[in-house]
């Protein structure tokens, strides 16, 4: 008797083989992988564009704290205005092209310097320096408007940002202080600018530098690059300066709006106006909700910004009834903005903090 188990003929045929996978499932998985790779590529591949679109507004009073017994709550609201600016990816491009009030600019228009094109991270760093210096300038302008006599410290010209594409990037760093040019003392930012303007692009200058990292004073030679065009070329070191002041009040300004850091200098006017309002009774706007955009200088002068048309849309969406914008904007941008504003928003073009205060006195009291 044969005790061996009988074997199905197909058993040998299938012996050692794994089950064949479902063909349709394999195709689906492959297609899904291809789509994922395509999405990742298009979402991370940056085109040579930046997009600028309406962003929003934020009440400045909530971003400023002042240690003083004379601080008052503001009646009405003073808003800063911002745009959404970002490098454009392959995925963004078709949507940005059709979005209302969104503009695409070549990267060079946003990120170019006289010596190269900044990386996305360098643009962020530059905008952070603009924001920081605008906060300081706003404090000085506001306090001087209120009768304080704030002067710049005279221990040198501090550096707040360094262009990584410029000659100065090899020897200069954020926080360094330039104290002399070719042995001529530069106790302030203005004195440094004045000394450098005595030279021409292509010339080499000797800088005396107090290094932030070590505190030591060193000397370094830098060959000046050129900025401008034609016969108007000026010497370029490639640094952003950050003047320091002895401010008698403790004023803190946050650059965060909805958890995101603001960049650029265009909130300067709104910062200065809000500080004046908080320290002078809180009734500058007579209860009217207003918005401001514009750079501010320590002497109170107001300078131009970018994205005026997009900012006008942001202000319209906020419901503010008055919008202060700086002189120096292109006539075309002003014309388009006024057309967008219609009768819902009154636009005033201003060149100084004092002019804004004068206009505010004429505004009717909000009911």
Image (spheres, rainbow, N blue to C red):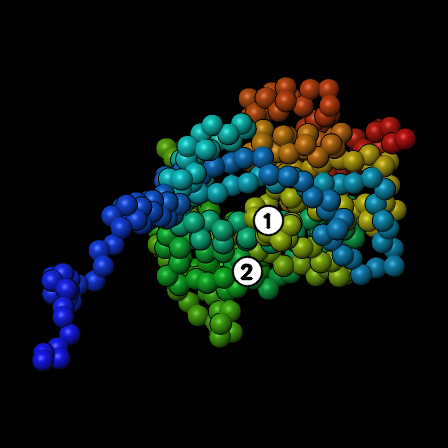
Instruction: Check the image and name the residue furthest to the front.
Output: 1
Residue visible at 9% across and 78% down in the picture: 2
Query: Percent position (x, y) of residue 103?
Result: 49, 31
Give the label on residue 158, or none.
2
Horizontal side of 109 relative to 202 (left or right) equals: right
Q: Is residue 100 visible?
A: yes
Under tag 2, what secondary structure?
Answer: strand
Category of crowding for the residue at label 1, using alpha-carbon neighbours closer than 10 angstroms: few (below 14), some (14–19), many (at least 20):
many
Q: Is residue 301 visible?
A: no
Horizontal side of 63 relative to 47 (left or right) equals: right
Quarter of the image for the C terminus: give it: top right
User: Between tags 2 and 1, which lies in front?
Assistant: 1
Q: Between residues 168 and 200, which one lies in front from this camera angle?
A: 168
Mark 1 or mark 2, which is nearer the start of the sequence? 2
Q: Is residue 82 above or below residue 134?
A: above
Q: Is residue 122 above or below residue 219?
A: above
Give the label on residue 173, or none.
none
User: Disc 1 marks which residue?
Assistant: 262
Quarter of the image for the N terminus: give it: bottom left
Residue visible at 55% across and 40% down in the picture: 84
């Amino acid at each position: 008797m044969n005790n061996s188990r009988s074997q199905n003929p197909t058993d040998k045929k299938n012996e050692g083989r794994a089950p064949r996978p479902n063909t349709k499932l394999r195709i689906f998985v492959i297609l899904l992988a291809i789509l994922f790779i395509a999405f990742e590529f298009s979402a991370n591949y940056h085109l040579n564009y930046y997009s600028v679109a309406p962003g929003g507004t934020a009440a400045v009073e909530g971003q400023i704290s002042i240690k003083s017994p004379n601080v008052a709550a503001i009646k009405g609201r003073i808003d800063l205005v911002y745009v959404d600016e970002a490098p454009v990816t392959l995925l963004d491009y078709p949507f940005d092209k059709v979005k209302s009030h969104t503009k695409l600019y070549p990267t060079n228009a946003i990120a170019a310097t006289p010596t190269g094109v900044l990386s996305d991270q360098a643009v962020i760093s530059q905008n952070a320096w603009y924001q920081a210096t605008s906060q300081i300038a706003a404090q000085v302008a506001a306090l001087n408007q209120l009768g304080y006599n704030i002067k710049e410290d005279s221990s040198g010209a501090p550096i707040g940002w360094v262009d990584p594409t410029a000659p100065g990037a090899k020897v200069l760093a954020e926080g360094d202080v330039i104290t002399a040019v070719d042995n001529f003392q530069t106790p302030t930012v203005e004195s440094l600018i004045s000394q450098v303007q005595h030279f021409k692009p292509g010339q080499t200058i000797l800088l005396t530098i107090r290094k932030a990292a070590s505190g030591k004073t060193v000397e370094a030679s830098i060959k000046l690059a050129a900025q401008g065009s034609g016969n108007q070329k000026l010497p370029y070191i490639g640094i952003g300066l950050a003047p320091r002041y002895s401010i008698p009040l403790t004023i803190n300004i946050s650059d965060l709006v909805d958890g995101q850091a603001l960049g650029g200098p265009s909130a300067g006017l709104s910062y200065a106006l809000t500080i004046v309002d908080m320290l002078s009774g809180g009734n500058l706007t007579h209860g009217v909700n207003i918005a401001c955009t514009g750079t501010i200088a320590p002497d109170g002068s107001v300078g131009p910004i970018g994205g005026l048309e997009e900012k006008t849309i942001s202000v319209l969406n906020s419901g503010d009834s008055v919008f202060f914008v700086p002189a120096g904007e292109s006539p075309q941008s002003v014309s388009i903005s006024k057309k967008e504003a219609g009768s819902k928003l009154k636009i005033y073009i201003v060149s100084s903090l004092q002019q804004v205060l004068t206009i505010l006195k004429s505004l009717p009291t909000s009911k």
